[in-house]
Amino acid sequence: MAVQHFKTSGFDAAVEAAPLVMIDFWADWCGPCRMLGPTIESLAAQYEGKAVIGKINVDEEPDLARRFGVMSIPTVVFLKNGLEFDRKVGVMPAGAYTQVLDENL
Amino acid sequence: MSFDVLIIGGGPAGLSAAVNVRARGKTVLVVSNPLEENPLWKAKKVDNYLGLPDISGPELLKTFQTHAEASGASFLTGRVLNTAMAGERWYVSVGSDVQEAGALILAAGVVRSRKFSGEEAFLGRGVSYCATCDGMLYRGRRVAVLGWSDTARREAEFLTEIGCQVTYFHNPRSCEITGGSAVEQVNCDGTALAVDGVFILRPVMAPTDLFPGLAAENGFVTVDRQMATNLPGVFAAGDCTGGPLQVSKAAGEGLIAGQSAAKWVDSHRK
């Protein structure tokens, strides 16, 4: 499954139904975010059918960024049935994300 | 853009590395702060660089820079914020740009200030290292910018332009960042200020912040005789590897790192 691009509308329904979700908060103007992009894409392929991997553009969806208290990008937030249980701020090696995903599958 | 070798730092070690990468016929990009912000720029006299006695820091730096330019190195002014490896290539973010290279040479000098109280705890909850990345998230809000250079001052101006309420602290020595779930206050050298965000714009990021997993001891990068670090394709040279913090030592290590990086690129070319 490709990376999901979440919008404010339909967001709650999409994440509450999913046992495990990882969301990358990003923006066009952010170099580190663009650097993380390929990692997120490959994780989406790797965890297809196991976890929902998505992105939120903080420029287009400021309400979601505010709701999650995102104050620095990239920030990657992990949710179980819509509830946050972990987050990683800044660019991390892929292993930092897979560790959280694997422990919560 | 894509290069064979990318060098972080444009002082004696970085420029020496650039000349030697070019001598091996490889493309090279040097990413650095403006030359005038190099610590060597402040040296009135350098008296132990072989063959060039009684030369000033600025003269020496300009001589090195001219040599590196003539060798065909490319230059980019900016601060490196992150690095990441994917598929045997290194990606480096500089402001809002991303550069790509087969090998990296870290020659960014020494970090002259320790982390402030609360800095690590509030990272991502009000503390930021990147004005271009996070500035938009603070529009209409109060932020403090802690800066040590003209570049930092310009980033503070950028934050003002996009609508942040900026207070600039120049050369703060000791700061404390406090708050609850997010930053609420910063106190620098006795001046306390209620803020929503604190941008800490040091001239140089700590090596271990730039490269997660990089081996270092007492803040200095661990290298072998080839100037190789523990990370694949990453070499280091100059003050960041330890003392003596002298120009000759930096230039010598830059030479080795440049040659080692060029060799690495040759042996990993697909």
Image: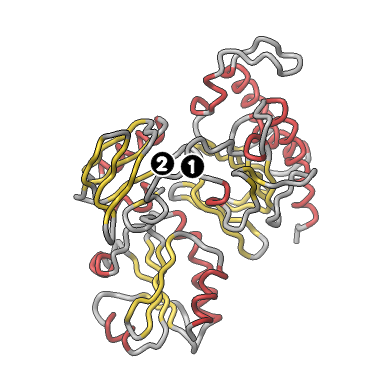
Q: What percent of the width, then of the height, locates residue B267? A: 80, 55
Which of labels 2 and 1 is toward the front? Answer: 2
Q: Amino acid at mark 1?
A: Arg
Q: Residues within 10 Å of mark 1 (few under 14, many from 20)?
A: many
Q: What percent of the width, then of the height, locates residue A29? A: 38, 54
Q: Residue at x 38, y 63 (%)?
A: A26
Q: Answer yes or no: are tags 2 and 1 on the same subunit.
A: yes
Residue B53's place in the image compared with A27, above or below, is: above
In this rendering, the count of numbered labels is 2
Which of the 4 image quadrants contains residue A79? bottom left
Q: Chain of mark 1?
A: B
Q: Residue furthest top?
A: B54
Q: Residue at x 34, y 53 (%)?
A: B134
Q: Residue at x 66, y 9 (%)?
A: B54
Q: In the displayed structure, does residue B180 sit left or right of residue B102?
A: left
Q: Chain of mark 2?
A: B
Residue assigned mark 1: B79
Q: What percent of the width, then of the height, locates residue B166? A: 25, 40
Q: In the displayed structure, does residue B270 sit left or right of residue B150?
A: right
Residue assigned mark 2: B201
Q: What percent of the width, then of the height, locates residue B255? A: 75, 35
Q: Secondary structure at mark 1?
A: loop
The numbered mark at residue B65 is none
* Image quadrant in which the C terminus of chain B is located: bottom right
Q: Nearer the viewer, residue B171 or A10?
A: B171
Q: Earlier in the sequence, mark 2 or mark 1?
A: 1
Q: Secondary structure at mark 2?
A: strand
